[in-house]
Image (cartoon, rainbow, N blue to C red):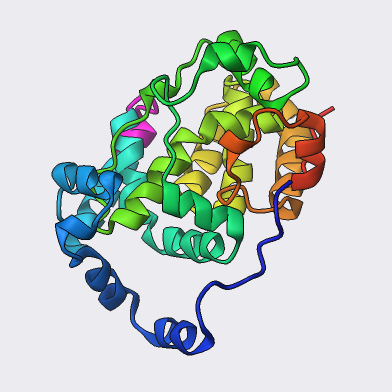
Amino acid sequence: MMRQCWRNPLPLVQRGWQSTMPRAHFRNMVTDVPTEQLDAYEREHLKHRIQTSTFQKLLLGAGSSIAALVDPRRHDMIACLGETTGENALWNILDSMESCEEGRRILAEKPRINTQTIDFKCLEALPPDTFGATYAKFLKDNNVTPDSRMEVRFLDDPKLAYLMTRYRECHDLVHTVLNMPTNMLGEVAVKWVEALNTGLPMCYGGAVFGAVRLRPKQRREYLKRYLPWAIENGKQMKPLMPVYWEQRWEQNVHELRAELGIKVLQ
């Protein structure tokens, strides 16, 4: 079962020292670590990272937001928008993960979710009411794959880059635990939940502007049922980023939802 996130792993003196340090300075300290001291994910990220100035990030954020609005199928622009606008939210997510044992294990082990790291035949063989079997069924029913997530390129700090990677790779797991399909209504509802749960600006943008594209009948259903449900869940549920989903495959999905404070849409 997931442990409550309330313990802070840092000594009080060090905690206070970091809390008064400017984020930009702390970021530079992290990225200046010698390469041999970085883990496999961090070294791989540095190969693909595109370093940008604050001004360049602003331009990329503005340009990608316009491109994503014009064509929501431009996943590269949506990814760019998330990376260039999400740094502050990612620092907050990092703090929340470092303050609980389950989150610290994720940060230490940096698990990945794709067809190379997960045995999906094993998940399919689990009892149908387990989270793992429910996730495998979700992927089949919606014809989606965990291998479609883009690499993070515009975040300087490898730790934040991993959190963005983790957010992307866990998106379908959030769909699963919320019992939401991948149609337009389901995507907008999940974006509201993610926005309120993570604070990522990209999620707020997807929730607001995604709803604009709904058809009249969908919009009525959205306003009547999906939006109130999403806001209620987003506000009351526990943080999802510190959940080590891969260690919950055999857990009863209904018990997992109850543990996280999730109510499925009726």
Q: Position of residue 240 (x, y in %)?
A: 61, 47
Residue depicted at x 35% and y 35%: 68
Horizontal side of 132 relative to 207 (left or right) equals right
Magenta extent = 67-74
Above or below: residue 15 compared with residue 230:
below
Residue situated in front as seen by the camera: 67 or 197: 197
Residue depicted at x 48% and y 23%: 118
Q: Position of residue 54 (x, y in %)?
A: 21, 64
Residue depicted at x 37% and y 23%: 148
The residue sitting at the front extreme is 36
Q: Position of residue 111 (x, y in %)?
A: 44, 40
Above or below: residue 58 compared with residue 141:
below
The residue sitting at the right extreme is 266
Q: Is residue 29 magenta?
A: no
Q: Is residue 71 magenta?
A: yes
**In this orientation, does residue 216 appear?**
no
